[in-house]
Amino acid sequence: MAEKIKFAILGADGRMGQAIIKAATSIDGVSINTALTHSQSPHLGKDALALAGVMSGAGQSIVNLTDDLSQAGQSDVVIDFSAPQATLDLVDAIKGSAVKAVISGTTGFNAAQQKSLDGAISDLVFLQSGNFSMGVNMLEALVELATSKLRQGWDIEVLEMHHKRKVDAPSGTALMLGEAAAAGRDVKLGDVQVLSREGQTGARQEGDIGFATLRGGGVIGDHSVIIASELEKITLSHSAFDRSVFADGAVNAALWAVKQSPGHYNMKDVLGL
Ligand SMILES: NC(=O)C1=CN([C@@H]2O[C@H](COP(=O)(O)OP(=O)(O)OC[C@H]3O[C@@H](n4cnc5c(N)ncnc54)[C@H](OP(=O)(O)O)[C@@H]3O)[C@@H](O)[C@H]2O)C=CC1
Ligand SMILES: O=C(O)C1=N[C@H](C(=O)O)C[C@H](O)C1
């Protein structure tokens, strides 16, 4: 019998960590051997699978939550949905270990954090995406196509809404969609982005890519890219109905990643988009 691929999960008692546990335990060739969380988590020492509502047995043993990131070093893959500092600490803790690939969905890295991460992952398959859903990755391709065709006189705005517990803004997905819109226009997002507006902002500049953020209730993730001229408007949008779309995407990405050579990848590589 072929050996199972060993997964560690960082942020295992979070909303996404629990969705990943459900997705991964439904796949025969995978076992979860490490569940990692914050040193202040009230769930330390508890069984992460039970917490996620997965019954133990059927080839999967109890996995107690720990804050010792070095324990991930015994896995083949780490799936990370946590917080920027936790991702950086993880990459440091698994240096030189058996881990072949890290799949990271964590968002909210500032430029300095992303630079440190880029410099620290050379020996790994590091697959990073602000959104693991098939629909959002298709939306990204459509946005690039539309903005490459609709240029002078067409204004681009990105709108996102998420649940009230989200801690970063604009969302990683909104920034991904902004990058796609900028690529369609052959510009760098950093040169044209307007991440928020308030007060006497002055008129909109031609070529700006604007962002607006809404937070409330239990919204899992809604994103729209609006492309407006003086006379008409196109809205390209996506709504996620369940976190399983992100979790299934991340687990599929992990199964793809263990077969790749070290490097920095994203979901477009996995989906061939
Ligand atoms: N790319 C994608 O498709 C998606 C990305 N995300 C992103 O994933 C991340 C997590 O989202 P979500 O699950 O909703 O958030 P949660 O707050 O529910 O979960 C985050 C988890 O990470 C843990 N954590 C936070 N800081 C640390 C730390 N320094 N060390 C170790 N563990 C830590 C938290 O522990 P504690 O609660 O004790 O602090 C918690 O277990 C966010 O960045 C979010 O934007 C979310 C959905 C889809
Ligand atoms: O925090 C979330 O919940 C989500 N975060 C990701 C993001 O920042 O884009 C992806 C998804 O929309 C849910």
Image: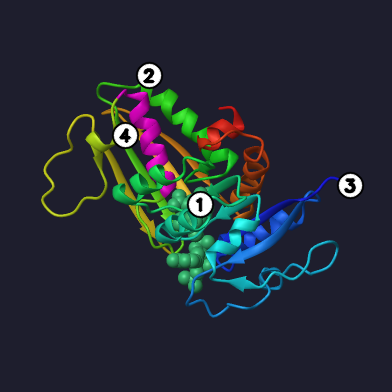
Residue 171: x and y, percent?
40, 51
Q: Residues within 10 Å of mark 4 (few under 14, many from 20)?
A: many
Q: Horizontal and vertical percent for residue 225?
A: 40, 38
**Residue bearing the label numbered 3:** 1
Amino acid, disc 1: Lys
Q: Earlier in the sequence, mark 2 or mark 1?
A: 1
In the rendered view, would you say 234 is above or below 165? above
Nearer-the-camera pick, 32 or 124:
124
Q: CA distance from mark 2 to mark 1?
A: 44 Å
Mark 2 highlights which residue?
149
Q: Nearer the viewer, residue 19 or 119?
A: 119
Q: Residues within 10 Å of mark 2 (few under 14, many from 20)?
A: few
Tell me whether the residue at label 4 lies in contact with that at label 3, contact meaning CB atoms closer than 8 angstroms: no
Q: Give the colour scheme shown.
A: rainbow
- Report the side of 66 relative to 57 (left or right): left
Q: Secondary structure at mark 3?
A: loop
Majority secondary structure of the magenta segment? helix
> Which mark is on residue 156?
4
Q: Are marks 2 and 1 in contact (CB under 8 Å)?
A: no
Q: Which element carries disc 4, helix, strand or loop?
A: strand
Give the quarter of the image for residue 125: top right
Name the front one of labels 1 and 4.
1
Q: Residue at x 84, y 61 (%)?
A: 59
Q: Is residue 182 magenta?
A: yes
**Where is residue 142 drawn, in percent x and y?**
48, 28
The amino acid pointed to by label 2 is Lys
Q: Of circles 3 and 1, which is in front?
A: 1
Residue segment shown in magenta: 172-186
Left or right: 195, with 273 as reference point:
left
State whether residue 233 appears in this view. Answer: no
Q: CA distance from mark 4 to mark 3?
A: 53 Å
Disc 3 under 8 Å from ligand 1? The reply is no
